[in-house]
Image (cartoon, rainbow, N blue to C red):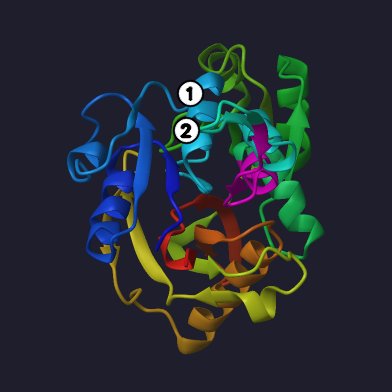
Amino acid sequence: MDRKIGLLGGGQLGQMLCEAANPLGINIIILDTEKSPAKQVNAKHPHIDGSFVDPEKIRELARQVDILTVEIEHVDTNVLEEIAEKGVEVTGSDGKKSVKKVEVQPSWRTLRMIQDKFLQKGHLAENGVPTAFSKALEATEEELQAFGSEYGFPYMLKARKDAYDGRGNYPIKSASEIKDALEVLNGRSLYAEKWASFKKELAVMVVKTSDDPQQHKKSTIAYPAVETVHEDSICKLVYVPARGISQDLQQKAQDIARAAVGSLWGKGVFGVELFLMDDDTLILNEIAVRLILPLIS
């Protein structure tokens, strides 16, 4: 393959991408700190040292590649939009300057929406995907008390951005915990979410092969749902296949995951987290971006 891939982030996921790319002879240029894990398994290519959220470093990477992808969704989508829609200035071997547009996958639109978990939930609800009810808040004690009074305690108070592995979440079990929750999440944009009484967490990996968000039944492929077991909000065990899940529930999990990913823009591989509720219904918790190597040709 002649096209070069630029990867924002060189951690564990980037390392796995490079391990898969090396036997295929795919050229990946990584933007991350020196000697990051992905760079260590892909030392035959020159890379760029620096932060993968630094706009100038991202532009430097874009000048050298044909496709930009990400290890994690916490990136600067404004710069990615600029690169994809307007292009980045490059200097040719003859010294002349020109502008080159670089493909961004998954689309910067998808990355931006997934970054904000409240917007993500709203987008999914608009597309018929079942989720827990959520409401944006100005984060005052009065608002949080009102939410609990209307929708019940316990409920979850969540940061809209930069929240993962339990960080940015605070379960409010009673009105007496509201003040502590606001102190812990101080300074962050927040939303409240009704408590999801679930008995299992499931995950479905979905591949999206088309840029079009309207053709999900034709452009999405779902792997079987697995069961994930978390400890301190970190995934500790994965059961394949998921234990005690009927074929009907397995199919419903895949259908929900495909509908969710199919509503997004661009191509990509996505991890879809679902809750199996006490009444055997399924709701989507959140979507995580994964890597796109299988889609590049």
Residue at screen point 71% across, 25% down:
144
Q: Mark 1 points at which residue?
A: 57
Residue at screen point 65% across, 63% down:
260
Q: With respect to residue 273, does 104 lie above or below?
A: above
Q: Residue 61 carries which label?
A: 2
Q: In which quarter of the image is residue 172?
A: top right
Q: Is residue 84 left or right of residue 13?
A: right
Segment tinted magenta in the rendering: 98-114
Q: Residue 274 carries which label?
A: none
Total number of numbered labels?
Answer: 2
Residue situated in front as seen by the camera: 287 or 220: 220
Residue situated in front as seen by the camera: 140 or 45: 45
For residue 189, say whether it is visible: yes
Q: In this view, does 120 lie to the left or right of 201?
A: right
Q: What's the amino acid at mark 2?
A: Leu
What is the quadrant of the N terminus in the image? Answer: bottom left
Q: How crowded is mark 1: few (under 14 residues within 10 Å), some or many (20 or more)?
A: some
Q: Determine whether the residue tagged by mark 2 lies in a helix, strand or loop.
A: helix
In percent of width and height, residue 257 lies at: 58, 68
**Disc 2, disc 1: CB below 8 Å?**
yes
Q: With respect to residue 232, does 138 lie above or below?
A: above
Q: Residue 36 colored magenta?
A: no
